[in-house]
Image (cartoon, rainbow, N blue to C red):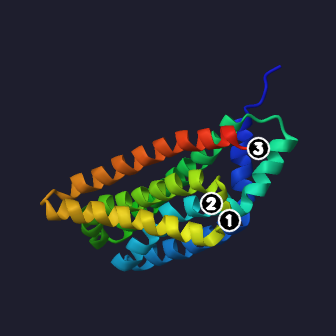
Amino acid sequence: MRKNNPTIGLLMFSFYSSRGNMGFAFLIILVLSAALLITGNQSVYLFFTSVAVGALPYLIMMKMGAKNQLQWEKLQISMPLKRKNMVVSFYLSILIAMLAGLLLCGIILGIGIALHATLLEHVASTAFASIANIIGLTLLMAGLILPIGSTKFGENRGELFFVICMGIAIGIVFLINYVGSSAGIQPVFISLAQIVISAIVFIISYYFTRKIYAKMDF
């Protein structure tokens, strides 16, 4: 008899535990999508892109933060789970949510461009940089929140810790843009650098979190 993959169960738990906030996020995305498709406004496009790609990973990170750590500890006690599976589920949840946001963003923008030809030029010139900023910010935040939030430092500081991690991630994204622009590097390469650097931080963070969980007492 084939055994169920525990990582899949944990992924389902991650999204299920965030269902309330996700419903609200989808409502905002729906409103912004309608506004973009009706007006073709460039400002709405930028706001929509940020929310569509970044909102779902952000909400999952909040649910995986220190104040919700007890849920995961109870799950660990009640089910025969390996700690590696728990950590893998954390990081996969972020990636799946981000990719779902990117897919949704692409679909809505495609429809928007079909309805408003004037939107094409703006999207073509700014879409990659905008999405690279959001991807970089999301991966950097996850790379900081997931390992540090698993320690007593993150657990004892709650929302303050979350805000600090967000500030650091925003600072890194700004620094990459500033250094690249000052050096005269083309925007496309700056955007690529953001994605690569944030992905490296995300991967390194995964191994740190595995080590932290390996030493934790549940």
Query: In whole angstroms, how far apart are the C-alphas of marks 3 and 1?
Result: 17 Å
Circle 2 Cα neighbour tier, 10 Å, few/some/many (<14 / 14–19 / ≥20): few
Give the quadrant of the C terminus. Answer: top right
Precedes in sequence: disc 2 or disc 3: 2
What residue do we see at 41% from left, 77% from top?
44
What residue do we see at 28% from left, 60% from top?
176
* Helix, strand or loop under label 2: helix
Kindly identify which numbered label has been placed on residue 217: 3
Amino acid type of the residue that numbered disc 3 sits on in the rendered structure: Asp
Above or below 135: residue 206: above
Amino acid type of the residue that numbered disc 2 sits on in the rendered structure: Phe
Query: In whole angstroms, how far apart are the C-alphas of marks 2 and 1?
Result: 6 Å
Circles 2 and 1, Cβ within 8 Å, touching? The answer is yes
Q: Is residue 123 left or right of residue 12?
A: left
What residue do we see at 50% from left, 52% from top?
143
The residue pinned by badge 1 equals 156
Circle 3 Cα neighbour tier, 10 Å, few/some/many (<14 / 14–19 / ≥20): few
Precedes in sequence: disc 3 or disc 1: 1
Q: Can residue 123 be seen in the rendering of this structure?
A: yes
The residue pinned by badge 2 equals 153
Q: Nearer the viewer, residue 198 or 109?
A: 198
* Helix, strand or loop under label 3: loop
- How far across and how far down the image is residue 94, in percent? 56, 51
Above or below 5: residue 133: below
Q: Nearer the viewer, residue 43 or 206?
A: 206
- How far across and how far down the image is residue 184, in percent? 12, 60
